[in-house]
Image: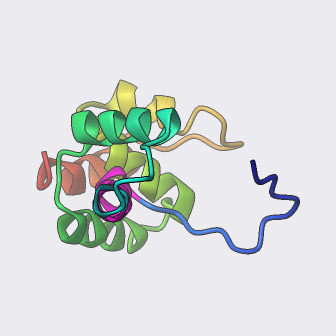
Amino acid sequence: MTIFKEIVDEKHLTVAETKEILADIEAERADDEDREMRYELARALEHVNRFAALDPEESREFVAELLELEKVDEPTAYKIVDLRPRDRDELRAIYAQERYSLSGDELDEILNVVSRYV
C-alpha cells in the first residue's frame, strides 16, 4: 500500500475528461492479467459512466465558453459543466458558497451557455 504525503500538482477536470483517463487506466489493467481492478477504480468508473453526458472535447469547449464570462472562475466553470444546471435555482446552488450573489441577468447569461450543451 502506498501512502502519498504531498500534492505535487492539481488540475481541474470535467467528469467527461475523468472518464477518458479512467478508461485508459482500465484498459492498461485489463492488459495485465495479474493485476486486479481495485474497488475504488471500479466505483469511479461506474460513477463517470453514469454522469458523463458530454465527450471530453465538448466539455473543454463548454469550460472555455464559461470562463469568458465575468462571474465564472475556473473551479465554478467545472462545477457548472459537470452539473449542467437547468434553471436559476440550480445555478444559485452552485454559487451558494460565494461571498456574492449573481443578478438575474448574470444567471441568465450563464444559463444561455449551459443551454447549448444540455
Q: Is residue 57 visible?
A: yes
Q: Position of residue 29 (x, y in %)?
A: 37, 58
79 or 17, nearer to the observer: 17
Q: For the point 35% across and 50% down, which residue is it?
A: 15
Q: Quadrant of residue 42?
A: top left
Compared with 32, 79 (above or below) is above
Q: How many marks?
A: 0
Q: Residue 69: where, in percent of width, then height?
A: 40, 67
**Magenta span: chief secondary structure:** helix
From this viewpoint, is residue 105 visible? no
Q: Is residue 57 above or below residue 13?
A: below
Relative depth, front residue between 91 and 41: 41
Residue shown at 35%/34% (left/top)? 47
The figure's colour scheme reads rainbow
Residue 110 lies, in percent from the top left, at: 32, 52
Highlighted range, magenta: 14-28
> Is 27 part of what is drawn in magenta?
yes
| Image point (41%, 32%), residue name | 43
Please tell me which residue lies in front, 35 or 56.
35
Q: Residue furthest front?
A: 34
Would residue 116 be found to the left or right of residue 46 on screen? Answer: left
The residue lying furthest to the top in this view is 89
Please name whichever residue, 5 or 70, is drawn nearer the observer in this view of the structure: 5
Q: Is residue 64 above or below residue 62?
A: below
Q: Is residue 43 magenta?
A: no
Most extreme residue toward the right is 5
Identify which residue is drawn at 71% across, 42% down.
99
Q: Using residue 10 as the reference point, say whether residue 52 is left or right of it.
A: left
| Quadrant of the frame with the C terminus | top left
